[in-house]
Image (tube, rainbow, N blue to C red):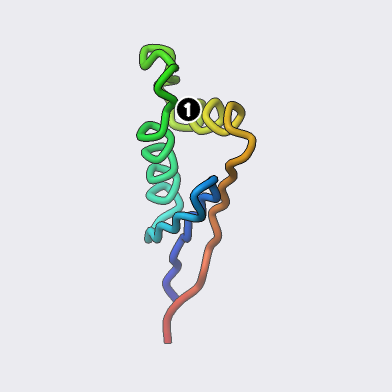
Amino acid sequence: MDKVFILSILHRHGQDLYASRTYEGAHAALANYCRENWCDQCIVEDMPPEDSELIEAYFDSTPDESWDIDQLDVGA
C-alpha cells in the first residue's frame, strides 16, 4: 500500500493543501510556504536557515495560522 502525505495550512485567506509522496516532501513544502510568506518587515537575514527552525519561527510569529501533515494510505 502506498502512502500520501497531505499538508494543510490554515491562514487568514483560507486553506492551502499540498500532497507529497513523502513526509520530507510535505515538510519541505511547508518550509517553502514559510519562506514565501516571511513578513515584509522582517529582515531576510534573520530567517532561520534550517527548515524546522524556520517553520517554528514563522508560526510562532503568526498565531492565527496553523499547519498539519496527515498520512493517508492509498492503493488497491
Residue 54 vertical placement versus 5 (above, below): above
Tell me the residue at 53%/46% (across/down).
Answer: 11
Residue 57 screen position, x and y as percent? 54, 25
Q: Is residue 5 left or right of residue 56?
A: left
Tell me the residue at 42%/28% (across/down).
Answer: 38
| Callout 1: SS | helix
The residue singled out by tag 1 in the image is: 54
Residue 2 screen position, x and y as percent? 42, 72
Tell me the residue at 44%/17% (across/down).
Answer: 42
Residue 18 vertical placement versus 62 (above, below): below
Furthest toward the front, the residue is 13
Residue type indicated by callout 1: Leu
Tell me the residue at 41%/34% (across/down).
Answer: 37
Residue 68 screen position, x and y as percent? 57, 51
Q: Quadrant of the C terminus?
A: bottom left
Q: Nearer the viewer, residue 55 or 44?
A: 44
* Total numbered circles: 1
Q: Is residue 25 left or right of residue 63?
A: left
Residue 30 screen position, x and y as percent? 44, 43
